[in-house]
Amino acid sequence: MKAAGRTGAVITLAGALALVPITAPTAQAADTGITVSRIVINGGKPVVVGTHDVQEPSLTFRITLPSGYSTANPFAYRGEPFLYHDTTPAKGADGGGLYPGGYTCYETSSRIADCEGTVRIDPYYRLDSNNDATTWKVAVLAQLFKTNGQLRTQEHTATSGRVQIKRWAKATVNASPEPVKKGKAITVTGSLTRADWVKHKYTGVASGLARLQFCKRGSTVYTTVKSVRSSSTGALKTTVKASVDGYWRWTFGGWDTTGSATSSGDFVDVR
């Protein structure tokens, strides 16, 4: 048995889904009798979203139907998790809720089906405020339909599940001069930016604590040399003394609302 999600066709996921449980108990819709349990979104990890690219974190859950309904008839019911914040489940479902982009359900008995798919997060159309970088709640939409396809009853049920959605961050680096004499100063600059869901572009991160790291040529291990706060526009700048050939990079650990970022390494030849 296959059931399509709210906004897309059934899809097949590649690879294994992470099965780290979200702290969400079984949600039973009182009016429908549908139970949705075992909800797992993105393996319990935060979801980091940029300005335009659609993110589709993994989703798994179980549907248990009330007496008189069968998983063999997917058109008779609907039961799926969705995300909302700063409102009630019902209002969140109507305005700003994040739904599965598609999922597939597999019968385990006549009234139980296990489902896997994704949650569709399109930042350009679904995230219209930077305040959307917050903790989203997990709720369940359950519906039963009549034989003619009309809605019989529906319920929006809250759970204690939570998913953190963050703004994607980027870091750049430039170390100069190149080459440089041993013992002379190297100036390392860069920038720290993050997704702005209002302007639909990346803007500077002010006061972000970035670590300057160095990796000797021939090694793969980076070590932290010093830490620097970004300017009001997200600019990074510091000076260090040249000693040996190697790569310089900036790395940012992120915040509750902002993902982490690490620049590529910039090689400096020391002579």
Image (cartoon, grey):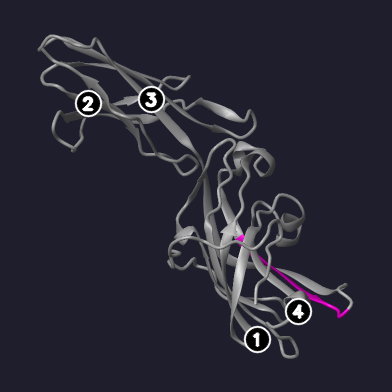
Residue denoted by label 1? 111
Three-letter amino acid code at the position of disc 3: Thr
Query: In this orientation, which residue lies closer to the viewer: 157 or 60?
Result: 60
Tag 2's secondary structure?
Answer: strand
Q: What element does badge 1 sit on?
A: loop
Secondary structure, mark 3, is strand
Give the Cα separation between the discs numbered 2 and 4: 60 Å
Q: Is residue 26 above or below residue 271?
A: below
| Mark seen at residue 32 | 4
Whole-percent x and y of residue 135? 55, 51
Mark 1 or mark 4: whose residue is earlier in sequence:
4
Residue 143 picture location, percent across and down = 76, 72
Count the numbered circles shown.
4
Q: Is residue 91 left or right of residue 108?
A: right
Q: Which residue is mark 2?
A: 247
Q: Is residue 40 left or right of residue 112?
A: left
* Sequence-first tag of 4 and 3: 4
CB contact under 8 Å: marks 1 and 3: no
Q: Give the residues drawn in magenta, as a range.
A: 138-147
Q: Which residue is mark 3?
A: 172
